[in-house]
Amino acid sequence: MQLDDPAVLAEARAVFDRYEAAIAANDTDTLDAIFWEDARTVRFGVTEILYGHAAIRAFRATVAKYAPRAARKIHLVAFGQDVVATHLEYQRLDSGLVGRETKIMARLPGLGWRVVSAHVSLLAGLDPGRQQKG
């Protein structure tokens, strides 16, 4: 298996960039199209836990506008020709909070690249469940 094939990374980055543009424009149709239309698709968000494309679509229909954000770091890793993990560290421009977004994309027969799993979170303060040394 080849890691980080430049052609695969370029294809995935194009989908990543298309997704980011759709978030900025609140283009729900594009956001929905980028996700795999399947009951096995998962999206964990800041305030939601969604299983299945129908649940993801229903959630997106309730969003009037996404908070504006600026990318701080983008990191992609390609595993062979058909799987890419994307990682975005961003800052919300409205609150200054730092967010993280991980998407697993797969090249699916007849569909091309689709997000099959996503996790979005905001960086909180200290974890109250973690004990610090010292």
Image: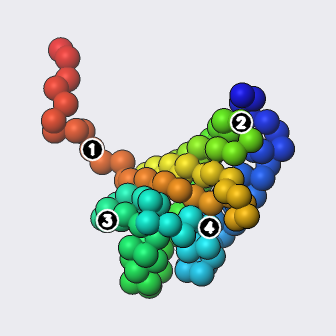
Q: Which of the two discs, 2 and 4, sits closer to the camera?
A: 2
Q: Check if mark 2's residue and mark 3's residue have beta carbons within 8 Å.
A: no
Which badge, 2 or 4, is on the more N-terminal residue? 4
Q: Position of residue 76 (x, y in %)?
A: 65, 42
Residue hosting label 3: 48
Residue behind mark 1: 125
The secondary element bearing badge 1 is classed as loop
Q: Which mark is residue 82?
A: none
Disc nearer the start of the sequence (2/3): 3
Q: Residue at x 56, y 64 (%)?
A: 36
Q: Which residue is mark 2?
A: 80
The residue under the point 16% across, 38% down is 128
| Number of the front mark, 2 or 3 | 2
> Which residue is drawn at the image coordinates 60% and 81% (left, top)?
29
Q: Is residue 88 left or right of residue 6?
A: left
Q: CA distance from mark 2 to mark 4?
A: 20 Å
Q: Nearer the viewer, residue 77 or 115?
A: 115
Asked if one can make out residue 45 in the rendered structure from this viewpoint, the answer is no
Please tell me whether mark 1 or mark 4 is closer to you in this view. Answer: 4
> Looking at the picture, how far across and down is residue 48, in whole percent?
31, 65
Task: In the displayed orientation, state which residue is furthest to the front.
Answer: 109
Q: Which residue is mark 4?
A: 34
